[in-house]
Every structure is written in structure tokens, then in C-alpha cells.
Image (cartoon, helix red, strand yellow):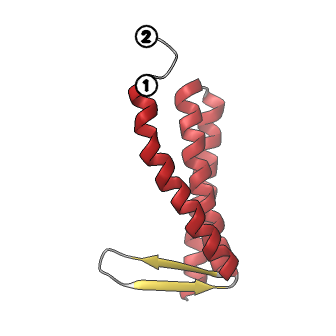
Amino acid sequence: MSKRPNFIYMVGMIPVLFVVGLLIFLTFDNLLSGRAVYGDKFGNAYEVEGLAAILVNLGIFGIIGWLGSYLAFLVNRSPKLMWVHRAIGVVSGVCIAGGLVYGLS
């Protein structure tokens, strides 16, 4: 099997990159306005502001980095990249959970 990604695999990345770009745009907009909005599957919306919003938005940027580190791991298959991927995921999760708990309490 070739180490070079297939054409189909690369074309399949176009929607992923579009969604990630949209997520970056919306998160950056929320970060500049000093808020973070969260919704659940029941249609409830929660909004946090201030420090909590900063934590949540940084956590979302961390999740984007988490996805990027996993894609880098898929290409390289380095154990060090998997460690980085897991560390970014833990820090991002803690930031989002901490921001939501702090902001909604």
C-alpha cells in the first residue's frame, strides 16, 4: 500500500475542512463578542459570558487542534503525535467543561 493518500481520501476531506473552517469562523466571532452559546438536543440554549466564554471558546479551538493532530497522526503514525493528540483532547475537554460549569453556576 502506498504511503501517499488516495485521491478519494483527499476529496473526502473537503467537507471536513469546510465544517472546520465554519467552526473556526463562528468560534472566533463568539470569542470577539465575549460570549459562548451552547445548545443541547432538546432545543435548550445556554449562553455564558466573560471568563467562562473565554474558556469554552479556547476549548473549541483546542478541539480543532485535536482534530488536526489526529489527522497528522494518521499520516505519520507516530506514538508522539498520539500522545499530543490525547493531551490536547484532555486540555480542551477540561476548558469546555470548566467554562460551562463556571458560567452556568
Q: Residue at x 66, y 65 (%)?
A: 58
On the image, numbered disc 1 is attached to which residue?
7
| Of pointers 1 and 2, the one earlier in the residue sequence | 2
Q: Secondary structure at mark 1?
A: helix
Q: Is residue 31 visible?
A: yes
Q: Position of residue 5 (x, y in %)?
A: 48, 23
Are the residues tagged 1 and 2 within 8 Å (C-beta)?
Answer: no
Location of residue 21 with respect to 44 vertically, above or below: above
| Residue 41 disc label | none
Q: Quadrant of residue 101?
A: bottom right
The N terminus is located in which quarter?
Answer: top left
Q: Is residue 77 visible?
A: no
Front residue (pair 21, 65): 21
Q: Quadrant of residue 62?
A: bottom right
Amino acid on which the number 2 mark rests in the picture: Met
| Distance (Cα) linking label 1 and label 2 | 14 Å
Q: Position of residue 36 (x, y in %)?
A: 57, 78
Q: Residue at x 66, y 74 (%)?
A: 31
Front residue (pair 22, 45): 22
Q: Position of residue 40 (x, y in %)?
A: 37, 76
Front residue (pair 1, 22): 22
On the image, numbered disc 2 is attached to which residue?
1
Amino acid on which the number 1 mark rests in the picture: Phe
Location of residue 61 with respect to 13 vertically, above or below: below
User: Is label 1 or label 2 in front?
Assistant: 1
Residue furthest to the bottom in view is 105
Q: Secondary structure at mark 2?
A: loop
